[in-house]
Image (spheres, rainbow, N blue to C red):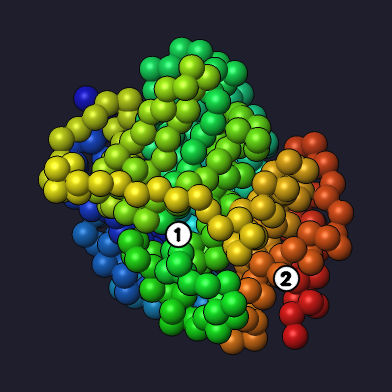
């Protein structure tokens, strides 16, 4: 039985709080040694006191004094992006759980890899932006990259025990809930409000990821992420709408066999598996009763009405810095929608315009090129938004 000493980057968000639930239930398997948050001082301080951690980081440096005032004197407080990297390199930790929204998790992820620490990744943007670099460096160091997204964790589980190479995989099939507008007529999407977009039918998540689920950009990001996580081409990555969110994803092999992973909709399942892998551990999470569920429903995605999936497949095929620009333009467009400056369909319309105006480049492992094109895509999106 191995106890992992875990650094949680993004401890006050939905993934981070679920990870702490796992730590409470399985202290013999998971010891939290460091915590980081963006700006939630009170919540971070409370978590640090509960778990007795001696290292914390607050990304928002303006609130450092408030945080220090709420913590014991023997707790070391870090700040900003460099603070995240310090936690990722922390001596004594053997796993870093990255659940930071956006691109801020990229440098800490690479710092953790450089120190030979296993990764549990919940931040899609990291592999979307720089999956080629991240996975190559992880292979060089011989460390495990364990997906925490329920869909990628499901695929990871379905691939366990498979001794053949990726050429024996016919398709990776990501399931999508369809979001709150799964059956909304296309002509009504222009009237969608922020309040409506934040009402996800299955999952309780942060604002950005909930809106991404409503536009299907979340699934588009997952398609690109799967391409790097599992070393497979975009043409072999598919999506099926499954509104019940019971089947979390599937793997189809070349002989026609399909393996699926099913569980209740609770992020503690994939987090626990990432922490305890390759072992499985009993827990108090709800178990499925298939007789009560009675039936499972699947539908073809509305590719034309929700272009995020088509744009993701294109960006993944082009490669280079195109996936980073796909992600960057979406982040800017979502923020504009939140602020009431852009309509709901305007999110994917903006992303499509950006990808049509800015040319992708091969980055050959140079992070500076990725960051340059990420910034260029953001600036282009801002210029396009009224």
- Disc nearer the start of the sequence (2/1): 1
Q: Is residue 53 left or right of residue 374?
A: left
At 44% from the left and 46% from the top, the residue drawn is 175
Find residue 328 and name its label. none
At 58% from the left and 72% from the top, the residue drawn is 186
Above or below, 67 against 138 in this view is below
Q: CA distance from mark 2 to mark 1?
A: 21 Å
**Is residue 270 visible in this depiction of the protein?**
yes
**Dot 1 lies on which element?**
loop
At 33% from the left and 29% from the top, the residue drawn is 277
On the image, the x and y values in percent for residue 271 come to 33, 44
Q: Which quadrant of the structure image shows residue 215?
A: bottom right
**Dot 2 lies on which element?**
helix
Sort mark 1 into few (<14), some (14-19) or many (20+) by Cα contacts within 10 Å. many
- Picture quarter with the C terminus: bottom right
Report which residue position mark 1 lands on: 178
Nearer to us in this view, 294 or 109: 294
Residue at the top extreme of this rendering: 163
Nearer to us in this view, 268 or 286: 286
- Picture quarter with the N terminus: top left
Report which residue position mark 2 lands on: 350
On the image, the x and y values in percent for residue 194 come to 49, 81
Sort mark 2 into few (<14), some (14-19) or many (20+) by Cα contacts within 10 Å. many
Nearer to us in this view, 51 or 157: 157
Q: Which quadrant of the structure image shows residue 35?
A: bottom left
At 55% from the left and 25% from the top, the residue drawn is 170
**Is residue 71 visible in this depiction of the protein?**
no
């Amino acid at each position: 039985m191995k106890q992992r000493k875990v650094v949680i980057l993004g401890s006050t968000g939905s993934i981070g709080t679920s990870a702490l639930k796992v730590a409470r239930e399985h202290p013999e398997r998971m010891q939290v040694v460091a915590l980081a948050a963006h700006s939630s001082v009170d919540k971070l301080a409370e978590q640090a006191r509960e778990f007795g951690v001696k290292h914390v980081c607050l990304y928002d440096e303006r609130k450092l004094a408030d945080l220090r005032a709420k913590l014991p004197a023997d707790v070391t407080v870090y700040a900003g992006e460099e603070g995240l990297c310090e936690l990722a390199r922390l001596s004594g930790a053997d796993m870093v759980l990255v659940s930071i929204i956006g691109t801020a998790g990229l440098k800490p992820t690479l710092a953790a890899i450089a120190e030979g620490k296993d990764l549990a990744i919940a931040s899609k943007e990291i592999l979307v932006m720089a999956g080629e670099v991240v996975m190559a460096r992880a292979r060089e160091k011989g460390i495990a990259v364990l997906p925490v997204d329920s869909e990628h964790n499901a695929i990871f589980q379905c691939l366990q025990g498979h001794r053949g190479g990726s050429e024996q995989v016919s398709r990776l099939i990501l399931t999508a809930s369809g979001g709150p507008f799964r059956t909304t007529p296309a002509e009504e999407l222009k009237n969608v409000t922020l309040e409506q977009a934040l009402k996800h039918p299955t999952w309780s998540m942060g604002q950005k990821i909930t809106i991404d689920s409503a536009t299907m950009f979340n699934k588009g990001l997952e398609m690109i992420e799967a391409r790097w996580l599992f070393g497979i081409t975009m043409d072999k990555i598919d999506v099926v709408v499954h509104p019940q969110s019971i089947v979390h994803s599937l793997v189809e092999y070349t002989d026609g066999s399909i393996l699926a992973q099913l569980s209740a909709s609770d992020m503690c399942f994939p987090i626990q598996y990432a922490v305890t892998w390759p072992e499985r551990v009993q827990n108090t999470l709800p178990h499925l009763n298939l007789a009560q569920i009675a039936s499972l429903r699947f539908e073809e995605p509305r590719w034309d009405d929700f272009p995020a999936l088509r744009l993701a497949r294109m960006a993944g095929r082009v490669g280079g810095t195109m996936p980073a620009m796909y992600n960057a333009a979406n982040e800017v467009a979502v923020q504009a929608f939140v602020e009431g400056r852009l309509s709901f369909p305007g999110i994917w319309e903006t992303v499509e315009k950006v990808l049509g105006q800015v040319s992708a480049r091969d980055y050959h492992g140079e992070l500076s090129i990725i960051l340059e094109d990420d910034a260029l895509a953001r600036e282009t999106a801002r210029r396009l938004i009224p």
